[in-house]
Image: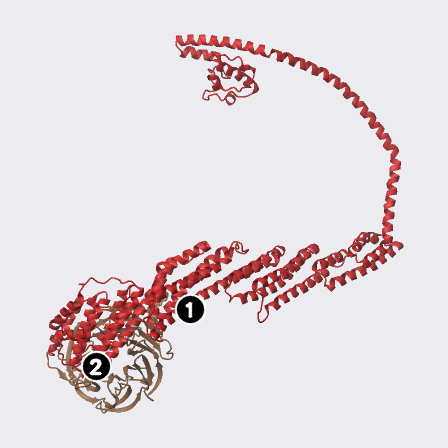
Amino acid sequence: MEDDAPVIYGLEFQIHIIDFDDENNIINKNVLLHQVGEIWHISASPADKGVLATCYNKPSDSKVLTCAAVWRMPKELEPGSHESPDDSSSPAHTLELLCHLDDTAHGSVACVVWEPTGDGRRVISLADSHILLWDLQESSSQAVLAGSASLEGKGQLKFTAGRWSPHHTCTQVATANDTTIRGWDTRSMSQIYCIENAHGQLVRDLDFNPNKQYYLASCGDDCKVKFWDTRNVTEPVKTLEEHSHWVWSVRYNHSHDQLVLTGSSDSRVILSNMVSISSEPFGHLVDDDDLSDQEERRPEEKSQEPPQDSVIATYEEHEDSVYAVDWSSADPWLFASLSYDGRLVINRVPRALKYHILL
Amino acid sequence: MAAVAAGPGPGSGPGDSPEGPEAEAPERRRKAHGMLKLYYGLSEGEAAGRPSGSDPLDPTDLNGAHFDPEVYLDKLRRECPLAQLMDSETDMVRQIRALDSDMQTLVYENYNKFISATDTIRKMKNDFRKMEDEMDRLATNMAVITDFSARISATLQDRHERITKLAGVHALLRKLQFLFELPSRLTKCVELGAYGQAVRYQGRARAVLQQYQHLPSFRAIQDDCQVITARLAQQLRQRFREGGSGAPEQAECVELLLALGEPAEELCEEFLAHARGRLEAELRSLEAELGPSPPAPDVLEFTDRGGSGFVGGLCQVASAYQELFAAQGPAGAEKLAAFARELGGRYFALVERRLAQEQGGGDNSLLVRALDRFHRRLRAPGALLAAAGLAEAATEIVERVARERLGHHLQGLRSAFLGCLTDVRQALAAPRLAGKEGPGLAELLANVASSILSHIKASLAAVHLFTAKEVSFSNKPYFRGEFCSQGVREGLIVGFIRSMCQTAQSFCDSPGEKGGATPPALLLLLSRLCLDYETATISYILTLTDEQFLVQDQSPVTPVSTLCAEARETARRLLTHYVKVQGLVISQMLRKSVETRDWLSTLEPRNVRAVMKRVVEDTTAIDVQVGLLYEEGVRKAQSSDSSKRTFSVYSSSRQQGRYAPSYTPSAPMDTNLLSNIQKLFSERIDVFSPVEFNKVSVLTGIIKISLKTLLECVRLRTFGRFGLQQVQVDCHFLQLYLWRFVADEELVHLLLDEVVASAALRCPDPVPMEPSVVEVICERG
């Protein structure tokens, strides 16, 4: 079957939808025009494949204002639909605007995060120092502000990144501003934890462990990737220092949370194996049905050393700063990275490691 | 002459005299001698030192003992030609003749002696006959004497027996008299206080009285004596208990009481109890000296007093006890040992308390002397009371104190190091307030290094006192081996160097997060310090230690190379951290300047922005600072007059090649393609790469970090036309001034190119400024 890796990247005014056919190693591209402006952040709805949200710069003469909007892409371009037109020369399609997530009173939007599970109706946008919780109604055509909270403090506080936790029935959101990471409860829109000085410099990105509800990864300008237990925020659980410049993006694998992907402006992508703090610290647990088949093999497995945390691979295909990395939502062994020069690289987890994790 | 070679001594006898001038004379004489020797059982060879080699058993040897004429003749006849036979015949004849004449001379010469010998023998015979007669007479006289003597003793026998009896009676009577007088004498003695005398009398009489107590008169005496003795014993006990008198008198009392047959067990207990009382008093006085708040006498005086008072007392008690109660056997010895152990333990506890008070003090010599006294004093009772293990305990205490001293010195060194650091911090902070240029970092470094070194040396010298020859405990195995290798070398020196490295590293461990409280200059200084340690100081210190303490290599010690590696690693981390900190400072400046400006609505550039000037100033300051401590380092060879010419090339090439296409927004891919192709040929820049120990490398690191930050910040902004031009101007300015600091100026070009290219990409209306105008602005600025 065709394997879809809906990786979307933005060049000025365009959204490209790349189809990656795993079996035939064919890459297929569709272009969507995004006429309102330069895209700074993009996120797809988890519930509806055709819906996505963007943050974009509104061109104006003297000021740059970043706005956010929810869009629907044309039906035939939705990932997974088979009638995708395979000629790349076909005219570019246009996005259909569903609604604006604008509240000009709150300033520029840094990013938009969808509720990870559910019906794709709840969205959070981070605008300067405010968290805005939106409720999308009437098939996303209308956005109602359901709640908001804002940072109090000296100086100009500005959110740089946010992430919605998939645990606790999606009631927690983590945000980053400057060197601080904060956790929020979406029901009361109040702060639940705060990691002061999480990084020596600006925090660039966050990600929640999909399998361990209190674990959070963060990365920043101090070249470090840190793993936190949000129940005890005084010290990081683990710190990685593999990159030689700012780390822009960190992502847990969606199903095997020992695999952590980081992208940095030293133009490297690093895939790490963080076994010790994953949900499977002692390797894959053998199911009961398998036990009977593998009776003879068990002693060997037991004698194995518990695997160590390590860097699995460093990908140096990029020539310039890597700003985004992400895992495929369809194939857990596939990931893509995007760099400043517009190069998109799709890679697989090394086969040996894959079998090691699976078997 | 052959005669000399034959070597007869001057007094070799009359046989020598007729020796003629003939050639064969020695031969003949040897033959004669040979016969004599044969007679006296000497073998020919060993006597004459004759040239050996001829077989003594050879029958053909004329002079041999086993000469066989037949064989000889046979041999001659068979082997020799006629002429030689004739020769030997004449020769032989001549020899025989000579021998004959010799013999005759000998006989003549010795004739007189034979005669006189014969005479002497005859005379002796005569004399012996006379002597025999006299001996006979003597024998008969002796017999007569014996006879007489026997008769006399027979007559005297009777009287002798009587005299013996009388003497016996006399002695008995005297004894009886002594017995009768005994009570009165005893009383007198007791009255006079001559207890010793009394006890002796009593001892002499006791057995007799015991034996004859069935006779009434003796019984009366015995009773009297017993009464008196009881009184005596009581008085003695009284004296003993009063205890006021010294130990020797007490010992005397006990001895007398023992002689009086008092039960030893009980006395032994009492004796020890008394001794305990006295020793406890000593201990109490010592304890009083300890006091809760010490105006205490110094430790030497304390141990002296303890040594003479308590230990001396204990010695006396022990020796007296061993003398008095030797009969008690092992049980008694055990009792004494337990006694000594207990009191010794209390004494040690006191000494340890006192020594603990001394722990903080700096004067080792006094302490060592005190310990020496203490240890020395305890060796005497140690010998006396081996079972109590006092000497071992004392040695243990000394060892413990030595160990604590080492710990104390390590602590001292550490705090000295920290003190140095504080001084440096102050020195670094103070002049900045005064507005002056920073103090000479090199000078500060030298100060720190020398003060640490002198502290180490002082500590070594202080600790060295423990192993001095004249100190009594220095030959204990602990002080010869473990103290030197594990204690001083590993614990003190290696421990200090390690802790120094750790302290230094701790400055890197909390980067930024807990505030960059560490001044960067301190990082730089520490890094240089560690590097110096790696290159020279560590091996110097360890050699010094090894020499002073003659470390014997039984236990494994940390090799110099490991320490050096640690120091080097520390130096590297410190320097890298320095680069990061300084890079961060400049980065923050650049970042603020990019982030806070409104690049869309900026005016046409007239000047280089002040931030850039500040960056260049700061970089220069850092360059000066690093230059004070680190060598220049290697630069990539470049044309010497770089700045301008290369810039104009770079600027014009950029205009045509690099971002000219980006004017036309319709072909954005070309820009990417071009820049990608260019990047393919340029090396990837490792921004936070490890730093080498030289100035250029440090500066390169800092500049790399700063420019990369500038690049990333520029990419996040949108620029108007004039914003782009401002960036252009700024980058040119940086290019003009920064190239000289880095190892490879190509790097600066590359990064700045990248910045301008990124700014152009982020500009909706990219119209670059004329390079000539840029240059004019920069030169003016």
Front residue of this view, candidates B70 and B236: B236
Q: Tag 2's secondary structure?
A: strand
Residue A256 to residue B122: above or below:
below
Chain letter for mark 2, please.
A
Chain letter for mark 1? B
Q: Classify mark 1: residues with Cα within 10 Å, few (<14), some (14-19) or many (20+).
A: some
Q: Nearer the viewer, residue B24 or B418?
A: B418
The kind of residue tagged 1 is: Gly
Image colour assigned to chain A: brown
- Relative image position of residue B554 (x, y in whole percent): 45, 54
Q: Position of residue B373 (x, y in %)?
A: 57, 58
Q: Amino acid at mark 2?
A: Trp
Q: Is residue B740 visible?
A: yes
For residue B551, which quarter of the picture?
A: bottom left
Residue identified by numbered label 2? A40
Label 2 to label 1, Cα distance in Å?
53 Å
Is label 2 or label 1 in front?
1
Tell me which chain appears red.
B
